[in-house]
Image: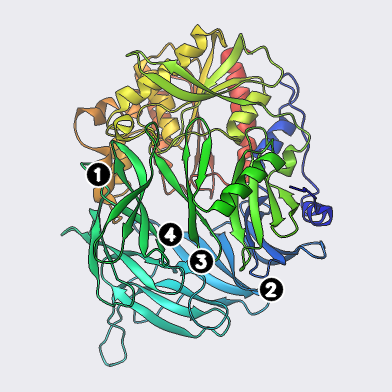
Amino acid sequence: MDRRFALRVGVAIGGVLAGAVQATADPVGPVAPVAAAFGAREALRQASLSPDGTHIAMIVAIEGPGEALQVADLATGGTPKTILRTSGNPEHLNTCHWSADTRIICQISASIEGGRGALGFSRTIAINSDGDKMKMLTAAASDRALDVMQDGGTVIDWTAAGAPGSVLMTRKFVPEMSTGTHLANTTDGLGVERIDTISLARHVVEPGRDGAVEYISDGRGVVRIVGTRSKTSLGYDTSVIRYTYRKPGDRNWQPLGLLRLDGTGDAGFNPYAVDADLNVAYGFADKDGRQALYKVALDGTLKRDLVLARPDVDVDGLIRIGRQRRVVGASYATERREAEFFDPALRTLAAALNKALPGQPLITFVDASGDEGKLLLHAGSDTDPGRYYVLDRASKHMAEVLPVRPQLTGMTLAKVQAIRFRAGDGTMIPGYLTLPAGSSGKGLPAIVMPHGGPGSRDEWGFDWLAQFYAARGFAVLQPNFRGSTGYGSAWFQKNGFQSWQTAIGDVNDAGRWLLSQGIAAPDKLAIVGWSYGGYAALQSAVLDARLYKAIVAIAPVTDLDSLREESRNYTDYAMVDAFVGRGPHVEAGSPARHADAITAPVLLFHGDKDRNVGVAESRLMAARLKSAGRKAELVEFPGLDHQLDDAAARTTLLSRSDAFLRASLGL
């Protein structure tokens, strides 16, 4: 494949970020430039290719936590035009996609403090590619509404029948007060509308349905599947979603199956997409204790065929392409993320791309022109944060658009290797080891970094947090402890909270392995974690107070009952209650209740607008540690949420944690 770079586009877009810092990874040098480079947000956060393949819409990071929507002309390569900006406090620009050659749809979210806690809202807008005629697509709320409309709608079909620019979009119907009028809306629940994003004409395709939580179309403007979820007598969501479907040309709904979300027994079938040509639904279900991809016939027989399964890991990704979002493959993560394509042409193309981009094996098809003649790709690796390309399939020319993290240009990043270590009970635990570039790999200060979730896992690739510490001379081990997803139900166990002793035991065995291999120097071992990883960092010291000499916990859970109570005023309370569970593990597994057992110094970071884990959890932990006479410090970031999505905040987190670790480990 001929590889040619459109430098005009790359330079022009990169010019917007001309102030980027190029840092040198010097473990004994000043931390400020390194922290600033790694703490910078991703410059290009999301991108979409216009239907005619001539323009790219890009969400880019701007000052503070804000975002901007820019449009670049691929033909001229001129400076991209900024047509929309959000401040990040409180509104964020989440996603933007083209509905027509000159029309873009964006979803904006915000969090607003209410009497019972923070409420999340979303709104969907349409805007011309030149910044003109910005209009709200979310249906206007009535002053007679009997409920708050938080959900601003999601596009489920980009090629709905009708004029160019027509889409299918979900709508939350809210009943209205009917006193004194016959015009009040009495419909309640989630429905679907066909909306012309240019004229704004709208037509109800599926009326609001009580309990509806999801609609799936066939990519041709026809809704084929709906998922509904009932509530308890107290108004909380139940743990079962019931899916129904329609045969082609039939308006009657028929049972498709149940999806159980509580982790008990067979989870059932989880549909993701409909193939109109094959008349099947693609989705995931259990096979021998691991998740596999199936297709189910939508012809009345519900015949189920296995599409892809693995004996070692879950198949957890569906690869889709084009404006009809057709299914072309699936993916799974062994030591690395791997893809299997069902489409022969794309299978050949993927193989060619791997040869053309040998240093960037993680390749994703992001978007496509209407005829799929041009593709927008993202490619990266462990030592490359990634960059976007546009591929012309006819000419076989590929143009680089922009690196995701230009601030790291010129820096030698650390390689990541997949490893396995033996837990105390003999189980081999997978993980990823990052060693400082150019180091011997022995006698280093070292960090164990458990992932968040706990319903998650680490994968091979670029990780800005691990790479920063490696650039500062630390070895970093990221264990996929039992309680992680991706390895089947037996590995997940009850989850990382209810099975905390196993999960945290694996995390501590990761630290012992670093010491036994001579990678970590004696008394130079620390633990750093975010979210559940922060919980694991704190709880690890409750299990073994002498192993780690310093603890950094970012937005951590510190008390399981507190985590449960944070959800009491939300509809997912019953699910969170079941996930946390009840019994002796709540007391034993809450680090804030065992602060006196933690002897290592602790540094906590938390955003005070965190809706995932409230800042009160870190405040409680800091207070309990100080009451027990332990060394603890809490750094709060005003106005920021769980992700701390702000370059200044992340730079502070990196520089202060680096100083804390060095002081605590005597470096």
Task: Residue at 20%, 36% (x, y): give it.
Answer: 582
Which is more N-terminal, label 3 or label 4?
4
Q: Residues within 10 Å of mark 4 (few under 14, many from 20)?
A: some
Q: Which mark is residue 324?
A: 3
Q: How many marks?
A: 4
Which is more N-terminal, label 2 or label 3?
2
Q: Residue under circle 1?
A: 577
For the residue pair 533 and 351, the one nearer the viewer reads as 351
For the residue pair 77 and 519, the one nearer the viewer reads as 77
Identify the residue at the far left of this view.
Answer: 233
Q: Residue under circle 2?
A: 131
Kindly report the distance in space between the C-alpha atoms of the residues bearing marks 4 and 3: 29 Å
Q: Nearer the viewer, mark 4 or mark 2?
A: 2
- Horizontal side of 383 relative to 531 (left or right) equals right
Give how far across and how far down residue 260 sits, in percent. 25, 49
Q: Residue under circle 4?
A: 120
Kindly report the distance in space between the C-alpha atoms of the residues bearing marks 3 and 2: 26 Å
Give how far across and how far down residue 129 sits, in percent. 68, 72
Q: Of helix, strand and loop, which one carries label 4?
A: strand
Kindly report the distance in space between the C-alpha atoms of the residues bearing marks 1 and 2: 46 Å
- In the rendered view, tell whether residue 356 sits above or below residue 146: above
Which is more N-terminal, label 1 or label 3?
3
Q: Nearer the viewer, mark 3 or mark 2?
A: 3
Task: Residue at 42%, 84% (x, y): give it.
Answer: 203
Kindly report the distance in space between the C-alpha atoms of the residues bearing marks 3 and 1: 39 Å
Q: Of helix, strand and loop, which one carries label 2?
A: loop
Q: Nearer the viewer, mark 1 or mark 2?
A: 2
- Horizontal side of 444 relative to 342 (left or right) equals right
Which amino acid type is shown beneath numbered disc 2?
A: Gly
- Is the C terminus in the top left, top right, bottom left or bottom right quadrant? top right
